[in-house]
Image (cartoon, rainbow, N blue to C red):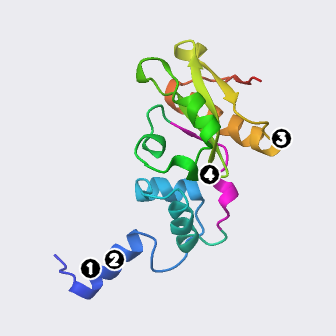
Amino acid sequence: MTVLSLRALNRATLARQLLLQRSPMSALDAIEHLVGMQAQAPFAPYYGLWSRLDGFTGEELSGLLTAPFDNILLSHADRTRVISDEHRKRLFSGKNGVFPGTVLVDGFVAGTWELVGKGEATSLQVLPCTRLKRAAQGEVVSEANRLLACAFGVAEPHVAITA
């Protein structure tokens, strides 16, 4: 059995956390590898990934779907970093404290999403708060397709972006 010195153990920990050198992996692969990224301010994960990944751009995280009741909206006193007051009032006017999943584009809430149907017939409906650019629409659809395929085994996912 090999016993690591304190220095070797520290360096192994830094390497596992992608802090010794920049990695060529994608942002989503890095988040999976790190088992998430936690931050009190929404831009901190961008800085954390930028410092770990070779060639990271914030656009890699555009079009992400957050889960219903996600702490990005529920745990921050100052939510204006991720959602406008106008959109916040609309989102938080839900029934019985139910908060839908949200769509993030460039780190800001750009809409909500909900599942429709069950099992292999499950589809996803996106309700934008603002007009989504074509590139953002493609990213949202791609992320939604990944969710439907991974979580529900949907072979031919259907995503609707409504007005």
What residue occupies the far right of the structure in this picture?
134
SS label for mark 4: loop
Q: Which residue is at 43% across, 53% downward?
A: 36
Residue count near mark 1 (Cα–Cα under 10 Å), binned few <14, some 14–19, many ≥20: few
Considering only vertical position in the picture, is 95 above or below 1? above
Number of numbered discs overlaid on the protein picture: 4
Q: CA distance from mark 1 to mark 2?
A: 5 Å
Q: Which residue is at 60% across, 41% downward?
A: 85
Considering only vertical position in the picture, is 64 above or below 112? below
Q: Which residue type does callout 4 highlight? A: Gly
Q: Read off the residue under disc 2.
A: 12
Q: Read off the residue under disc 3.
A: 134
**Label at residue 43:** none
- As rendered, which of 17 and 160 lies closer to the eye? 160
Residue count near mark 2 (Cα–Cα under 10 Å), binned few <14, some 14–19, many ≥20: some
Q: Earlier in the sequence, mark 3 or mark 1?
A: 1
CB atoms of marks 4 and 1 within 8 Å: no
| Residue 122 is inside the magenta segment | no
Q: CA distance from mark 4 to mark 2?
A: 31 Å
CB atoms of marks 1 and 2 within 8 Å: yes
Q: Earlier in the sequence, mark 4 or mark 3?
A: 4
**Label at residue 9:** 1
Nearer the camera: disc 3 or disc 1? 3
- As rendered, which of 67 and 76 lies closer to the eye? 76
**Label at residue 107:** 4
x%, y% of residue 97?
42, 24
